[in-house]
Image (spheres, coloured by chain):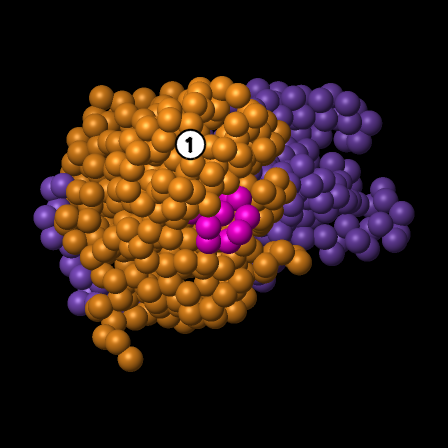
């Protein structure tokens, strides 16, 4: 053994509290683990690579003529919508993968280490922002290929992308919560899509709101996903960071404030 | 009250209930600092559950315990700074390489990037894993995985190390390597609390042993004291002619002075012996009585015999799924084969 003596347990100075700096450091270490895993298992990136391409292509040509008269006119409406839909859907995978991950023996070690309890969860969610970034980039790139030229300019498009990534990260706490409390990965997927489909489709992502019946219009207008879609449209098409963007950020903050503590508590209960 | 530096672990009346199964039903343990303490018992006796409670992985439903004087419930984060846990299932990340695993755990233990790298290299060297350092863990053998697991537990040089069945499933050579590693650990001043199903392992390593069965400690003492309760060795005898069984048992009673037990299968006789040498006298007597033998051996008492003597039932008489392990799986902690294949 290289370590010749071990400091006796009774003579160590220890604290029973994890500070914010350590929490952040632990979370980033765990995010590093997530990135290595992503590199090892590139097949898990299929949903963020193939889905944006196929969905953008399909929706553009299926709905373009019917909804906006032409493909070119539909793109400024659709690309922000499909971007939000794709990236938010991707955040479900975060919950599913977290569930699978937690069943592995290595989580026992995480629990036995003197690290912030939130770190294994926060790290996983943080690493997944890379997935959202991939999906965002591909969706915009696909739009560009199809002829979409955002009038807001590159800076505004990047900002719009960041807004979507931040909001999806916040939303992923909801699915992380399902991931922690659910019995199996399959059930996480089940519950999550049940929540997700109404949220993403009953929004202004694909169709103009005024074509909907009145009772639906009410829901679509309060739906946070609609606000996010509008915010992205404003940014990408007119380079304005308006009220919808602030509402989206506020919504994201509320989701994190509610679901992060809930998730950590559920996680610790299982610990 | 004893000074906290004397005792690495003090547990009183620990209880853990899973549904209507009392997996741990009032366990008391006192582990002196700097010793190896063995918890011996069959599958499902509550060994793993006990360790998981002491390692803050499970909340006890009753009783209390301290690690170096720190309460496991009130000061879990302090306890975690004092312990290393090597579980029954290797708690290392399968998708990462050996180096990446050690780097991650070093960083989580608060080491700087440079220190983490140095520590990882050092530990890989020490555990003979340098060559496999960058290989994916999926290609590791069971023994290599255990070694990496143990290496990961030693990063913070914890004064107390929990080893949950450290050699279960290892081949004899790897097992004796693991034993050497554990002995070296103790030489550096660590306290080790290990669980095992094997009496010889506890005998080889542990200063004191607690025998645990159905969630309670049924005996506690040194290996010598435990074995004395079943004789220092045990005689096994099979006769060529089953008709002379009774006469043979009579001869054993005469020569060794003990009552022998007839095992139902294959008509074997077993008997505890205090002095293995006296088997010579028995052989002479059997020859004189004209009793032909087919097989005879004198061996160390097995866990089964210790159990039989201590609890009055064999170690494996309940074929039900091991409560401790099953419960650990249900709580999402232990990787079960089903989950592996479901992916």
Closer-to-camera residue (B74/A45): B74
Q: Is residue B36 magenta?
A: no
Q: Quadrant of the N terminus of chain B?
A: bottom left
> Which chain is displayed in purple in the rendered image?
A
Instruction: From this view, report whether residue B78 is shown above or below residue B134.
Output: below
Q: Is residue B127 above or below residue B305?
A: above
Badge 1: residue crowd in 10 Å (few <14, some 14–19, many ≥20)? some
Q: Which residue is mark 1?
A: B236
Q: Secondary structure at mark 1?
A: strand
Q: Which color has been applied to chain B in this rendered view?
A: orange
Measured from the top left, where is residue A109 in percent x and y?
39, 46
Please tell me whether residue B207 is drawn above or below residue A79 in the rendered image.
Answer: below
Q: Describe residue A226's horizontal placement relative to residue B325 as left or right.
A: right
Q: Which stretch appears magenta?
A: B303-315
| Residue B36 x, y percent position in the rendering | 26, 52
Side of B144 where A75 appears, left or right: right
User: Which SS type dominates the magenta stretch?
Assistant: helix
Q: Residue at x 46, y 53 (%)?
A: B310
């Amino acid at each position: 053994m290289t370590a010749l003596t071990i400091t006796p347990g009774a003579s160590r100075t220890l604290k029973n509290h994890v500070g914010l700096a350590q929490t952040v450091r632990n979370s980033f270490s765990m995010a590093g683990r997530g990135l290595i895993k992503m590199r090892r298992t590139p097949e898990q990136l299929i949903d963020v690579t193939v889905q944006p391409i196929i969905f953008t292509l399909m929706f553009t040509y299926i709905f373009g003529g019917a909804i906006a008269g032409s493909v070119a006119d539909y793109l400024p409406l659709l690309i922000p919508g499909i971007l939000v839909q794709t990236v938010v859907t991707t955040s479900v995978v975060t919950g599913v993968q977290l569930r699978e991950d937690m069943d592995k023996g290595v989580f026992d070690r995480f629990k036995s280490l003197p690290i912030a309890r939130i770190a294994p969860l926060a790290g996983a969610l943080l690493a997944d922002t890379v997935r959202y970034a991939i999906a965002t980039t591909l969706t915009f790139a696909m739009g560009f290929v199809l002829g979409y030229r955002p009038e807001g300019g590159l800076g505004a498009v990047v900002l719009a992308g960041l807004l979507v990534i931040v909001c999806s990260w916040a939303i992923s706490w909801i699915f992380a919560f399902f991931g922690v409390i659910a019995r199996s990965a399959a059930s996480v997927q089940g519950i999550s899509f049940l929540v997700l489909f109404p949220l993403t489709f009953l929004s202004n992502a694909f169709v103009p709101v005024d074509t909907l019946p009145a009772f639906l219009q009410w829901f679509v207008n309060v739906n946070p996903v609609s606000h996010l879609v509008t915010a992205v449209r404003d940014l990408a098409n007119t380079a304005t960071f308006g009220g919808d963007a602030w509402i989206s950020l506020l919504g994201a903050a509320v989701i994190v404030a509610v679901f992060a503590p809930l998730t950590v508590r559920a996680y610790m209960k299982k610990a | 009250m004893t000074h906290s530096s004397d005792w690495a672990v003090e547990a009183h009346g620990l209880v853990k209930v899973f549904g209507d199964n009392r997996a741990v039903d009032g366990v008391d343990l006192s582990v002196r600092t700097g010793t190896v303490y063995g918890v011996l018992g069959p599958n499902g006796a509550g060994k793993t559950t006990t360790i998981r409670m002491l390692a803050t992985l499970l909340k006890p439903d009753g009783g209390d315990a301290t690690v170096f004087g720190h309460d496991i419930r009130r000061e879990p984060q302090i306890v975690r700074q004092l312990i290393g846990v090597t579980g029954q299932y290797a708690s290392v990340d399968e998708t990462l390489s050996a180096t990446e695993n050690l780097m991650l755990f070093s960083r989580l233990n608060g080491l700087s990037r440079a220190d983490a790298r140095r520590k990882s290299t050092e530990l890989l060297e020490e555990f003979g894993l340098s060559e496999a350092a960058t290989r994916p863990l999926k290609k590791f053998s069971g023994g290599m995985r255990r070694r990496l697991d143990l290496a990961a537990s030693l990063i913070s040089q914890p004064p107390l190390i929990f080893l949950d069945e450290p050699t279960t499933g290892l081949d004899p050579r790897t097992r004796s390597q693991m034993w050497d590693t554990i002995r070296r650990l103790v030489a550096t001043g660590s306290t080790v609390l290990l669980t095992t199903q094997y009496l010889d392992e506890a005998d080889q390593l542990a200063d004191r042993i607690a025998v645990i069965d159905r969630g309670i400690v049924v005996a506690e003492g040194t290996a010598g004291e435990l074995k004395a309760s079943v004789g220092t060795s045990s005689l096994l005898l099979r006769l060529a002619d089953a008709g002379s069984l009774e006469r043979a048992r009579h001869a054993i009673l005469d020569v060794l002075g003990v009552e022998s037990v007839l095992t139902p299968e294959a008509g074997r006789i077993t008997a505890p012996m205090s002095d293995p040498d006296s088997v010579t006298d028995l052989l002479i007597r059997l020859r004189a009585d004209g009793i032909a033998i087919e097989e005879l051996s004198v061996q160390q008492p097995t866990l089964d015999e210790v159990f039989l003597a201590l609890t009055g039932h064999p170690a494996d008489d309940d074929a039900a799924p091991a409560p401790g392990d099953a419960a650990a799986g249900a709580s999402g902690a232990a990787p079960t084969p089903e989950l592996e294949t479901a992916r």
